[in-house]
Image (cartoon, grey):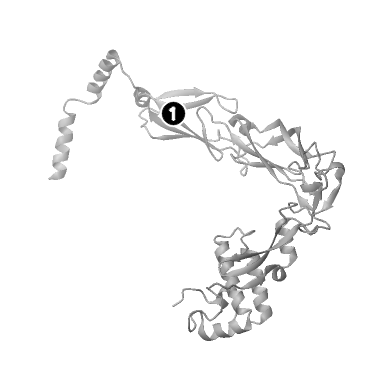
Amino acid sequence: MSDKRDYYEVLGVEKSASESDLKNAFRSLARKYHPDRSTEENAEDKFKEIQEAYAVLSDAEKRTQYDRFGHNGPSGSPFGGFGGGGGFNINLEDILGGDFFSSMFGGGGGRSNRRRGNDIRIIHTVSLLDIYNGSTEEIELDLPTQCEPCGGTGAEGGETKTCSDCNGQGRVRMRQQVGPFVQDVVRECPTCNGAGQMSAVSCSPCDGTGQTTKATTLRFSIPAGAEEGTRLRMRGRGAPAPQGKGQQGDLFIEIEVEEHPWFERSGPDLIMSLPLGYADLVLGTSITLEHLDGKDLTIKIPSGTNSGETLEIRKRGLPGRRSGGRGDIIVLVKLHMPKKVNKKTKKALQEVKDALAPSDMVERIKQDAKDRRS
């Protein structure tokens, strides 16, 4: 028994579906799951499945055999080359339309061939204080720019010639085997990188790339309360378009925040671990620290605080990007254990131990345990 899904179910059509219905269903699903552009999970497997279903149902003879025998016909597969050495020849460009492939490869053919330059991403590190206040940053970078002598074409004097491999279209048709299928696909021309044009003689200043680098000063603002990983977009500050034809890419500045001596961040809240001695926990204490808002942060530890307890200081955290207010500070109290203790301190600790744990304490614990067992 075949474990394949019903072909009509795969395409989402009724068994009475017309040829036009099948084609429309396949076109819609192929656009959704084409592995070169889909972000869907298992897109490649789904694309192969709908290809297989359409290849069978769009062929009148194969569809008749499938309707009669299903997936498991007499003498193996009833569909000729299916599952064997043959294959189904589906011209995807004819079905999906040239606009589908143009959108994938950024070109509309050699006549216009308007393509977009690559985006650039950089990481910029700021302090937690910058995140609290917001800041205006200025940095200098060597960024790619269009070569002036050749106008970005990569050709000396800007003189280009039509690519002979794609005849100026920027795209070439290739036939490839995908499982049991033979499919026609359209790819960016590897000779001219999709430009449709080639340099007659390479430009010397840019070595034929059409791009050089230039020191550029960038100024941008970091909003107060910005999250780690926030990306600031500067349109048109990325790489130039290939051949100098098309829109320049964008520049993305990703924010990275330096580690703070005692604060960690959780959204607008600030979390800190505060190690204290045993006496501070028993008797209580008060700790004062410098804070991001310019006002001293006073943490009051009540007497009898246990290690592991948390204290909350309201509205002293970071600005909230959505709420407009400020987050809180969460203080985790921890018992500090010294690595080395001198004899004098050990003697003092023994006296404290004797005072806090009377000699009959152990006996009482044993008696309690005995009572519970009985």
**Local SS, label 1:** strand
Q: Where is residue 237 in the image (x, y as percent from the top left)?
A: 75, 41
- Rendered residue at 83%/47% (across/down): 200
Considering the image in quadrants, where does the C terminus appear?
A: top left
Q: Is residue 292 above or below residue 84?
A: above
Left or right of 78: which side holds 280? left
The foreground one among 232 and 91 is 91
The foreground one among 24 and 345 is 24
- Rendered residue at 16%/39% (across/down): 369
Q: In this view, does 88 lie above or below 266?
A: below
Considering the image in quadrants, where does the N terminus appear?
A: bottom left
Q: Where is residue 196 in the image (x, y as percent from the top left)?
A: 79, 55
Q: Say few, some or many: other residues with alpha carbon within 10 Å of mark 1 (under 14 / 14 to 19 / 20 or more).
A: some
**Looking at the image, which residue sits at the far left?**
374
Q: Where is residue 209 in the image (x, y as percent from the top left)?
A: 76, 42
- Rendered residue at 84%/42% (across/down): 156
In this rendering, does residue 232 appear at all?
yes
Q: Where is residue 288 in the image (x, y as percent from the top left)?
A: 50, 23
Left or right of 180: which side holds 171? right
In this rendering, does residue 12 appear at all?
no
Q: Which of the 4 image quadrants contains residue 296?
A: top right
Left or right of 172: which side holds 33? left
Residue assigned mark 1? 274
